[in-house]
Every structure is written in C-alpha cells, then in structure tokens.
Amino acid sequence: MDLSLVPKIKNTDSNNFFLLAGPCAIESEDMALRIAEKVVKITGDLKIPYVFKGSFRKANRSRIDSFTGIGDETALKILQKVSQTFDVPTVTDIHEASDADFAAQYVDVLQIPAFLVRQTDLVVAAAKTGKVVNLKKGQFMSPSSMQHAVKKVKDSGNNQVMVTDRGTMFGYQDMIVDFRGIPEMKSFATTVLDVTHSLQQPNQSSGVTGGRPEMIETIARAGIVNQVDGLFIETHFDPANAKSDGANMLHLDHLEKLLSNLVAIRQTVNNL
C-alpha cells in the first residue's frame, strides 16, 4: 500500500509509523471533534501520519442491549465533519456488503472487522469502492492465511490494502499477540498492530468485554521494535463511561507520552 495515496494524510516522509486512532464508536459530534482535535495536535507535533478512527455502527455486540450507534448517517456525517474540520483522513468499519458504497461517500478507509474478514462478498464490495481497505486479522486465523484476504482485494482491482493484527484467541477469555506474525504479514501487505483490541478479554460472564489497558505500552513498544508499519489505538477522554470497549481503551491524557516514547523507539530501530 502506498501511504502517500491516502487522501489528506500528512508526514508520510517522516519515516515514522502511521497511526489509526480514535474512539471505538462515534457517540456524538462533540466527543468525536474533541478527541480528533487532541490527536491531530499530538501527531502533528510528532510527525506521525494520522487517520482518525471511529465506528459508525457496532454490529458485533455481546448482548442485545449493548450500544450499537447513534444512527448510521448521523455518525458517518460526523466522521466527514472530522475530516473536513481537521483535514485528516478517516476510517470506519463496515459489516455488510451494502455498507461499502454508503460508507465510502463519507470516509477514506474502509475496515473489515476481524470476525468478518472471511466474508468474500464484504471484502470484494469494499475493494470495489476504490477506497483503502484495512483487513483485520481474524482471531481464529494464522498470519499467513491473511494473504488470501489480501488477494481478494487485489483481484478486485484495488492494491490499496493493509492488514491489521488484533491478537489471536487464547483460551476462552484472553487474546495474545504472536509477534512472529508481523514480518510474515509484512511480506505480503502493509501491516498494522491493533494494540487495544489485542488486550481485550472477551466472553466475560457479564456479557461485557474486559481488557488490560495497563499493557498498552508493552504491546505497542513490541510492535515498533518488530518494525510494524502502523499502530491502531482506540482512545477516549473518559474510557470508564465510553459506550463501547471502554475496558481496553487508552485514556486520551496518556496518548502523547505513549506516542513520544514510541517515536523515540522507532528512531532507534531505524538507525540499527
């Protein structure tokens, strides 16, 4: 994938990792703009290429009463406003083939959720929009098997594709990152490490996914050391009261220090 072809992306000549970051779900216009403003400032100062992330709909929920969104078009228009306000690209996940053309009117990158990455119709529909496609590695898939999902995108006439590792299921209630997968996936696609989802603790008896946010820097550092191309981090100014995935999100107040440390590590790795 040629990062410089992503609309509105900046700092592509900095030799830095790139970042997909934002809230798990779009909860309101105010929250999206508030988060975006801070992340844009931090990434601009650190010369990190940045894409704002936010889900317009959360289709994969543990319980029927879990938050799913504020309305598809409402949320997509908020993502569009973030892009226009801060001059940054945006990414959102889609869940059905019919979502692809609809969401592509508002965002720059279409993301295929991990549980759906084997859904050929969905992957092909995303590819045919001509947008950049981010394929989340299924928790049940090996790194090498992701090359077939990448091929679906390329065979549909779209070479702008990346893969994102978000951990592999370890027992019933934990995720683990196998860092051997980073160089393996980099051999066939631009590779991102989803730091926060890799620290989820799914299948809790309460029906609410848990997480280990205290391990975010540990996983992120390991990703940079192993030369991942980009990082994916969900962040919120009030994770405890976020409407989705609050248990594993990074508090927005901690993002600047984390990214500063990671940039320093990246510079060291670049000089090895």
Image (cartoon, helix red, strand yellow):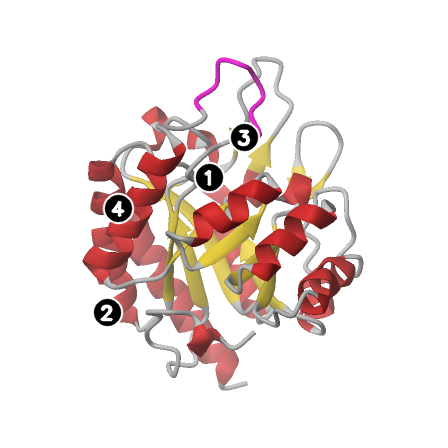
Left or right: 206 as drawn, with respect to 40: right
* Residue placed under numbered mark 1 in the picture: 213
Chief SS of the magenta region: loop
Earlier residue among tags 4 and 1: 4
Q: Quadrant of the N terminus?
A: bottom right
Left or right, 81 with reference to 198: left
Would residue 94 be visible to someone looking at this image?
Answer: no
| Image side of residue 34 versus residue 136, left or right | left
Residue 218, image x, y percentages = 51, 52
Q: Earlier in the sequence, mark 1 or mark 3?
A: 3
Residue on which the image places disc 2: 45
The first of marks 1 and 2 along the sequence is 2
- Select label 1 or label 2 by which is in front: 2
User: How far from the left and from the top, in percent, is residue 186?
Assistant: 66, 71
Name the kind of residue labelled 4 in the image: Ile
Question: Which mark is in front, 3 or 4?
Answer: 3
- 65 is within the stretch colored magenta: yes
Would you name the residue on which mark 3 appears? 59
Mark 1 burial class by Cα count in 10 Å: few <14, some 14-19, many 20+:
many
Q: Which residues are magenta?
A: 59-67
Q: Is residue 218 magenta?
A: no
| Sooner in the amino-acid sequence: mark 3 or mark 4 | 4
- Disc 3/disc 2 C-alpha distance (Å): 35 Å
Q: Residue 199, how many percent across, how many down? A: 56, 40
Measuring 22% from the left and 53% from the top, which residue is drawn there? 38
Mark 3 or mark 2, whichever is nearer to me? 3
Q: Is residue 60 above or below residue 80?
A: above
Q: CA distance from mark 1 to mark 3?
A: 23 Å
